């Protein structure tokens, strides 16, 4: 009888130990995230297990594993991807604690996922060579005056799809289709490269304007990508479009609780930890994203370009996923490679 009681007690204790963990699927590629997870473990005793990979591979694995998936959280760098997971039933409700709702604006969260950091997709130019028109908008980039002047990534890039999806949400499908047709005609070169490649194109004089996320400029200025990119970044400035109407397009890095999460409460604890001022300060000083929590200041490398610019807060970023298929269709039809 004593042996049986010991076995039951051992199983119960072992189960509790196993429960004190949280399993993350993440397409984010920052060592600084791992440092944060270690801090979380030190504070709570909850071990963080990380499975890193590209979004498509992680998506495939989570779908194939179904109920057997041991993942608790999925981290990614685009609201459209988070929305797609929600639409496919891969997330569950639960991201709605009072702390989360207090820390994050309703534009950047819902009951299934929450933003952890923000980024703006802006227009870059070389002030020594180009003087942008006053009150420049994304919509203006389809005009004749921009012919053969714009560098941008390919249409399969999720950040571009989310940008076009947001324009569809604001202006409607037909008007956005007209805009894309004109915009594509203004490319200085065939779309290629990553966001830093677009900034480099402006610095090298290959294009007068480029579209890229804000944190890439700060990353280049930090010197983490080498002196050549640092010097190139010093030649360009960001322009925050649509300041006279809806504001500049915003996107997020974020995370949601997976449908079959075995450690849901630990997952919520981790999300709340990432939204503390301490964690937010750590994130912005390592990734150069904007903080999702208003009381935290951005890193000085990005703050130098202004922090009071008008952000597009007229829509919830969750709409990107609903519009992305339409966005990709009209981008492809317009010849956006």
Image: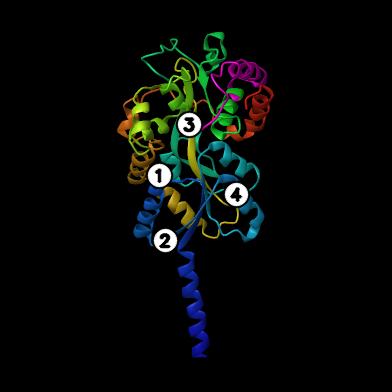
Residue assigned mark 3 = 195
Q: Nearer the viewer, residue 317 or 229?
A: 229
C-alpha span from label 3 to label 4: 22 Å
Q: Secondary structure at mark 3?
A: helix
Residue assigned mark 1 = 275
Rendering coords of residue 194 (x, y %)? 50, 33
C-alpha span from label 4 to label 2: 26 Å
C-alpha span from label 1 to label 3: 27 Å
Q: Secondary structure at mark 4?
A: helix
Pick the quarter of the image with the C terminus. Answer: top right
- Residue at the spot x=60%, y=28% of the render? 165
Counting residues from the start of the chain, the first of labels 3 and 4 encountered is: 4
C-alpha span from label 2 to label 3: 36 Å
Residue assigned mark 2 = 46
Q: Secondary structure at mark 1?
A: loop
Query: Which label is found at residue 57?
Result: 4
């Amino acid at each position: 009888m004593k042996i049986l009681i010991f076995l039951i007690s051992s199983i119960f204790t072992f189960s509790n130990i196993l429960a004190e963990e949280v399993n993350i699927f993440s397409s984010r590629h920052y060592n600084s995230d791992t440092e944060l997870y270690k801090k979380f473990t030190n504070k709570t005793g909850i071990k963080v297990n990380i499975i890193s990979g590209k979004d498509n591979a992680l998506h495939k694995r989570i779908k194939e594993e179904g109920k057997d998936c041991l993942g608790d959280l999925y981290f990614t760098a685009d609201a459209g991807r988070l929305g797609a997971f929600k639409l496919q039933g891969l997330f569950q409700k639960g991201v709605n604690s009072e702390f989360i709702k207090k820390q994050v604006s309703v534009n950047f969260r819902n009951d299934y996922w929450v933003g952890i950091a923000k980024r703006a997709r802006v227009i870059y130019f070389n002030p020594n060579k180009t003087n942008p028109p006053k009150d420049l908008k994304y919509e203006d980039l389809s005009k004749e005056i921009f012919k053969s002047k714009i560098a941008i990534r390919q249409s399969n890039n999720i950040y571009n799809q989310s940008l076009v999806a947001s324009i569809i949400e604001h202006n409607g499908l037909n008007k956005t289709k007209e805009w894309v047709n004109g915009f594509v005609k203004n490319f200085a070169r065939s779309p290629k490269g990553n966001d830093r490649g677009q900034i480099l194109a402006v610095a090298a004089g290959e294009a007068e304007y480029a579209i890229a996320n804000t944190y890439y400029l700060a990353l280049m200025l930090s010197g983490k990508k080498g002196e050549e990119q640092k010097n190139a970044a010093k030649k360009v400035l960001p322009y925050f479009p649509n300041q006279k109407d809806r504001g500049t397009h915003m996107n997020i890095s974020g995370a949601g609780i997976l449908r079959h999460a075995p450690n849901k409460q630990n997952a919520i604890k981790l999300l709340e930890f990432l939204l503390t001022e301490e964690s937010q300060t750590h994130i912005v000083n390592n990734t150069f994203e904007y903080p999702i929590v208003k009381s935290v200041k951005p890193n000085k490398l990005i703050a130098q370009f202004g922090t009071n610019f008008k952000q597009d807060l007229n829509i919830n970023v969750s709409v990107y996923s609903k519009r992305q298929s339409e966005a990709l269709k009209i981008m492809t039809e317009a010849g956006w490679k």
